[in-house]
Image (tube, rainbow, N blue to C red):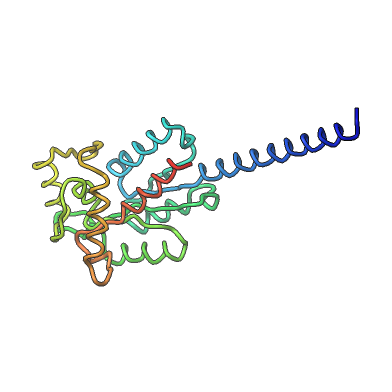
């Protein structure tokens, strides 16, 4: 073998090794991205059904693995407790993105709801812990309503659920797939922009679920 052929062979092998290392690095980065989101939800059905449906689509499209997006074990039904559920999840620190999905849901005379202190404490501690918050005021169903219409007048939880049931055939604790998500995002952003001073506790109606949705949709770009 000539010296030139030997040099060319060496350079070829060297390039192959670099390409191999680059591929391995790319695969490692992809695995890291796909192991990146941990969520904790206030509700046991409505929010989880919605999120798991998104997960299912992403899995079918081979954008994520079954363990890429994880919903923490549900033990609390109040905003501050939901944050505790998230933080107590094993390997909590290993996730790139951490989100809680909570409702303002003011205390009601017929029972249910949360104190303003509990809600605000969850927001404050989440910020300290670098946890993102997808909140809804009054409740998660406002995100569903925004798929169908723009609403900027205050509404309580019971009135909202009743409206969804009577006008749009909504069934509590069942997956709701009506309307257009792009329309919902525009409406959610428009609502937030309509408040001169953002105050999640008082901004009724409002939601930041669209921000979480955008993060989940980002997995489709991988």
Which image quarter: residue 105?
Answer: bottom left
Give the residue furthest to the left. Answer: 166
Camera-side residue of 123 and 13 = 13
Q: Is residue 120 above or below residue 77?
A: below
Camera-side residue of 135 and 40 = 135
Give the residue furthest to the bottom. Answer: 197
Which image quarter: residue 166?
Answer: top left
Q: Residue at x 87, y 35 (%)?
A: 4
Camera-side residue of 74 and 130 = 130
Q: Residue at x 20, y 38 (%)?
A: 178
User: What is the total number of numbered labels drawn onto the structure image?
Assistant: 0
The x and y percentages for residue 77 are 32, 51
Quadrant (top left, top right, bottom left, bottom right) of the N terminus = top right
Residue 122 left/right relative to 172: right
Q: Residue at x 27, y 58 (%)?
A: 189
The x and y percentages for residue 85 are 42, 51
Residue 159 left/right relative to 125: left
Q: Residue at x 91, y 30 (%)?
A: 2
The x and y percentages for residue 65 are 49, 35
Q: Is residue 100 above or below residue 222?
A: below
Camera-side residue of 110 and 146 = 146
Which image quarter: residue 12?
Answer: top right
Residue 151 left/right relative to 221: left
The x and y percentages for residue 196 are 24, 71
Give the residue furthest to the right. Answer: 2
């Amino acid at each position: 073998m000539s010296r030139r052929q030997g040099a060319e062979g060496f350079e070829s092998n060297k390039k192959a090794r670099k390409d191999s290392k680059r591929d391995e690095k790319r695969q490692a980065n992809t695995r890291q991205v796909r192991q990146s989101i941990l969520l904790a939800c206030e509700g046991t059905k409505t929010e989880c059904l919605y999120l798991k449906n998104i997960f299912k689509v992403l899995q079918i499209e081979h954008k994520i693995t079954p363990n890429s997006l994880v919903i923490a074990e549900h033990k609390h039904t109040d905003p501050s407790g939901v944050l505790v559920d998230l933080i107590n999840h094993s390997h909590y620190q290993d996730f790139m993105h951490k989100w809680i999905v909570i409702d303002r849901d003011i205390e009601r005379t017929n029972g249910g709801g949360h104190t303003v202190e509990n809600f605000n404490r969850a927001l404050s501690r989440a910020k300290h812990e670098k946890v993102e918050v997808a909140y809804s005021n009054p409740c998660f169903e406002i995100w569903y309503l925004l798929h169908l219409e723009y609403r900027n007048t205050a509404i309580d939880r019971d009135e909202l659920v009743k409206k969804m049931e009577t006008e749009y055939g909504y069934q509590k604790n069942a997956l709701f797939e009506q309307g257009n998500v792009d329309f919902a995002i525009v409406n959610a952003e428009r609502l937030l922009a309509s408040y001169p001073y953002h105050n999640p506790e008082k901004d009724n109606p409002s939601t930041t679920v669209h921000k979480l949705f955008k993060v989940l949709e980002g997995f489709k770009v991988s």
